[in-house]
Image (cartoon, grey):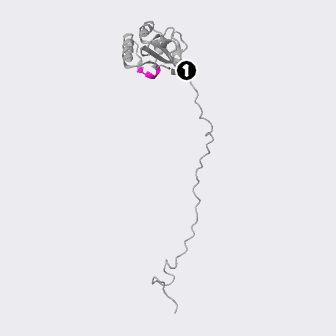
Amino acid sequence: MPETECIHGLALGLCDICYPKPKPVAERKPAPARRSVPARRNAARPAAVPAVNRDEQRIYFVSTIDDLDGLLAAGDLGELGYYDGPEELAWRERRRAADALEQLVLVSTRRAVGGRSPVPLDAIQLVAVANSRGQERVKELLAAGGFAVRVSIYPPWFQSGD
């Protein structure tokens, strides 16, 4: 006698386990376009160096706190030479003349100085000193001379290069 039901008790052909239906063939959609990552062409080359605006380049004048009174009275920096960067502030001549804690650095830009000689005090944007005692003293001298400029403590500029 022929079998009329599967092992699960269902009529032949009706059991999805014994007689699984073929999966419908779905229309395949194309995969979304993948954004390719461009090869790093610049990996071996250094990054482009931005152009330096020479007018905005800082320049530094070195003096002593004791000389600040004379500079304020004159209204300019007199014969002070300038340095193009803090690394030049190795205190070549001035280091021998005064203790580093008594020195100060007057900071400006080439644009503010504008080729003027002697450099007027209004071209100075910052005065740097070695410690808080020097900062207070310089602030007092500037206030007495009617000159307002920021006075910052920046010890690395006043350390010996030795």
Q: Which residues are magenta?
A: 152-157
Identify the residue at horizontal 44%, vertical 15% (top origin). Answer: 100
User: Residue 46 occupies which quadrant of the picture?
Assistant: top right
Q: Is residue 43 above or below residue 139?
A: below
Near-viewer residue (108 or 13): 108
Picture coordinates of residue 10, whole percent (x, y): 46, 83
Q: Secondary structure at mark 1?
A: helix
Q: Is residue 89 above or below residue 9?
A: above
User: Quick check: is 153 in the magenta stretch?
Assistant: yes
Picture coordinates of residue 64, whole percent (x, y): 44, 12
Near-viewer residue (21 or 47): 47
For label 1, the crowd category at 10 Å Cα-Cα, with few meaning under 14, some 14 to 19 and many 20 or more, is few
Q: What kind of residue is marked 1?
A: Asp
Identify the residue at horizontal 58%, vertical 64% (top origin). Answer: 28
Answer left or right for 70 relative to 13: left
Near-viewer residue (28 or 121): 121
Residue bearing mark 1: 55
